[in-house]
Image: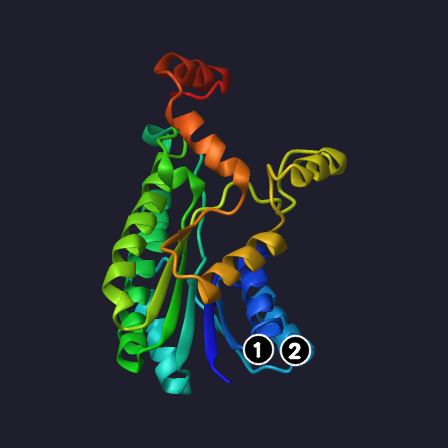
Amino acid sequence: MNWALVTGASSGIGLRYATALARDYHYNVLLVSNQETQLQEASRLLSDQYQVQTEFLYLNLAAQNAAEQVYKFCQDKGLEIDVLVNNAGMLIFNPFRETDLRRIETLVMLHVVTLTKLCRLFGADMAQRQKGYILNMSSMSAWMAMPGIQCYNASKGYVLNFSKSLWYEMKKSNVRVLAVTPGSTDTGLLPFGKSFAAVLRFFGITMSPERLVNRVLKVLFHRKKKTCMPGAWNYIIVPIINHLPDWLVLWAMNRLDMKW
């Protein structure tokens, strides 16, 4: 069986990707995360439940040489990665001038540097074998300018455009590249009661992680698209937000009562 590599795989959407790849597509899975206990438990459960091989690597993916460490781990273990899922990420919601420089550096390293290096290292191997899949998690916010998350949406904009460009380069090598731009995902952290959250899911305004992952993997494996934005509402929301007048955005900023 072939191997899939999932970053940020110890919890949340990353764990859903790892689970679906093992359960539905019968991939062996390498889980990479900076949550050691959860990582070990997830690796054990996937192996026991779905009879696949699993490996885990406890690693700070925002470190300067993180991508090289992941690649060396795979070489040392003899793991041939056919599916690369760059899922690990973080969110900063804060006025830019008050944001700690180390947090900015961590976000950029995680979303931009490590992701790009992983695509370069594993993508070259996939191209040589003439097969492979690269899935990069961007965000619906990549399509728009949003104060408060300026570092997040700018980095996700990089992921989106980098992935679209890479799609063209890798097409002749039979390697599929997909940028995912999800909107609101119900990970249990939304500030709503269960009943209201259920209503939002019913109308497709938010999406469960399981539904998101299932849709995305179907696109990755069965279609040849560059981008995937799950949820019909997102195609309505994005142009509306992009055409909001500046006075309304500034009003909303003031209502947030942050030190802009």
Between label 1 and label 2, give the one nearer the viewer. 1
Q: Which amino acid does label 1 sit on?
A: His
Determine whether label 1 and label 2 are within 8 Å by CB.
yes
If you read the primary sequence from the N terminus, does the residue marked by circle 1 or circle 2 appear first? 1
| Extreme residue toward the left, this view | 169
* SS category of the residue bearing label 1: loop
Q: How crowded is mark 1: few (under 14 residues within 10 Å), some or many (20 or more)?
A: some
Residue 130 drawn at (x, y percent): 31, 78
Tag of residue 26: 1
Left/right placement of residue 97 relative to residue 18 reads left
Name the one closer to the observer, 185 or 68. Answer: 185
Residue type at numbered disc 2: Tyr
Percent x, y of residue 241: 43, 26
Tell me: 155 left or right of 3. left
Residue 50 marker:
2
Work out whether residue 226 or residue 21 is closer to the camera in this orientation and state it. Answer: 226
Give me the residue at 25% from left, 70% from top.
172
Residue 91 placement (x, y as % from top left)? 45, 43
- Viewer can see residue 136: yes
Q: Tell me the number on the disc at residue 258.
A: none
The residue nearer to you, when weighing 6 against 162, is 162
